Amino acid sequence: MDNKDRLYAILSDVFQSGTLKKAVLSRPQDPSLLRAEGRTVLLKEVPHLQIETFTASGKALHRNFPLSEAPSALLSEFSRYRQLNLLTTGGDVEARISSKG
C-alpha cells in the first residue's frame, strides 16, 4: 500500500466515522492560492464536505461534495498543495509532499 492509498484509507475512515473537525490544506503549489479549509456542513439536511479555497486576490471559493465523494475530493484538492492537516475528534493527522515527492 503506497502513501496515497494510506491517506485515502484515513480520509475514508474519518468521513465514515464523522470525526472531522477541520481539514487545512497549505503550502500551495500555485502562487495564486493561499490555502484551503474543509469541514462538514449540512445542506438540505444532508451532510456534505465543504472546501473553501482562499486565493491571493482575496476571494474565497466554496465547493460542496456529498460525503460519499469526500475522500476523493479532498485527495484531489491535496494535489494542489504540499501539506494537509486533518483535525479530528480522535486526534490529528499531517501529510506532506516533499520536494522529492
Image (cartoon, rainbow, N blue to C red):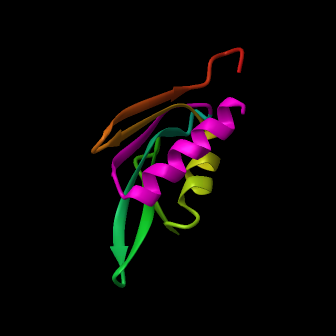
Image coords of residue 42 (percent x, y): 34, 73
- Residue 91 is situated, as x and y percent measured from the top left of the image, at 32, 35
Which residue is at the far top? 100
Question: From this viewpoint, is residue 12 visible?
Answer: yes
The quarter of the picture where the N terminus appears is: top right
Residues rendered magenta in the picture: 1-29
Whole-percent x, y for residue 69 in the image: 58, 64
Query: Would residue 15 be found to the left or right of residue 20 on screen?
Result: right
For residue 5: magenta?
yes
Q: Residue at x 62, y 18 (%)?
A: 98
The answer to whether 46 appears left or right of 32 in the picture is left
Residue 56 lies in the magenta-colored region: no
> Which residue does the image show at 64% across and 49% down from the upper left?
76
- Quarter of the figure with residue 50: bottom left
- Residue drawn 33% across the image and 82% down it: 45
Residue at left 52%, top 43%? 10
- Considering only vertical position in the picture, is 47 above or below 71? below
Closest to the observer, 91 or 38? 91
Residue 52 visible in the shown view: no
The residue closer to the viewer here, 51 or 87, is 87
Q: Residue furthest bottom?
A: 44
Quadrant housing residue 85: top left
